[in-house]
Image (cartoon, rainbow, N blue to C red):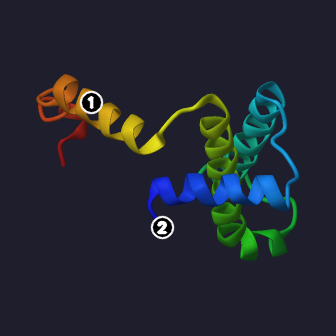
Amino acid sequence: MTIAEAQKTVDDWINTIGIRYFNELTNMAILMEEVGEVARLMARIYGEQSFKNAELALVAKDELSDEMADVLFVLICLANQTGVNLTEAMRKNLEKKTLRDSSRHASNEKLKR
């Protein structure tokens, strides 16, 4: 699925099954909630925090992918609501990063193996 296809698919879903978009501020709050859920899992899977229940660790990576998809879904909702073409935005962002960071990371001693 391309980014453009994802934007259309989400829009179609929202306008049929979801009835309508939540307002932009509500979706922003939902996005922060979903990012927090990703952060909670990352801290437990890859960081020093532990799960309260060992059984939760067994399904954590599946849950992580689902939470990341939730983040992407809500981000796409916000892009659709605000008229952002994510394909074009991503292309411009990568171009900006390439120009800005073309030698920055290569000369960073912390990144050398």
Q: Which residue is mark 1?
A: 97
What residue type is disc 2 on?
Met
Q: Which residue is mark 2?
A: 1
- Mark 1 vs mark 2, CA separation in Å: 24 Å
Neighbor class of circle 2 (other Cα within 10 Å; few <14, some 14-19, many 20+) is few
Q: Nearer the viewer, mark 1 or mark 2?
A: 2
Image x and y of residue 97, in percent: 27, 30
Residue 84 left/right relative to 52: left
Question: Which residue is at the front of the view, 12 or 40?
Answer: 12
Neighbor class of circle 1 (other Cα within 10 Å; few <14, some 14-19, many 20+) is few
Contact (Cβ within 8 Å) of mark 1 with mark 2: no
Q: What residue is drawn where x is 75% and y is 30%?
A: 28
Q: What residue is drawn where x is 34% and y is 32%?
A: 93
Image x and y of residue 23, in percent: 82, 31
What residue type is disc 1 on?
Lys
Name above or below for residue 102 compared with residue 55.
above
Q: What residue is drawn where x is 84% and y is 38%?
A: 22
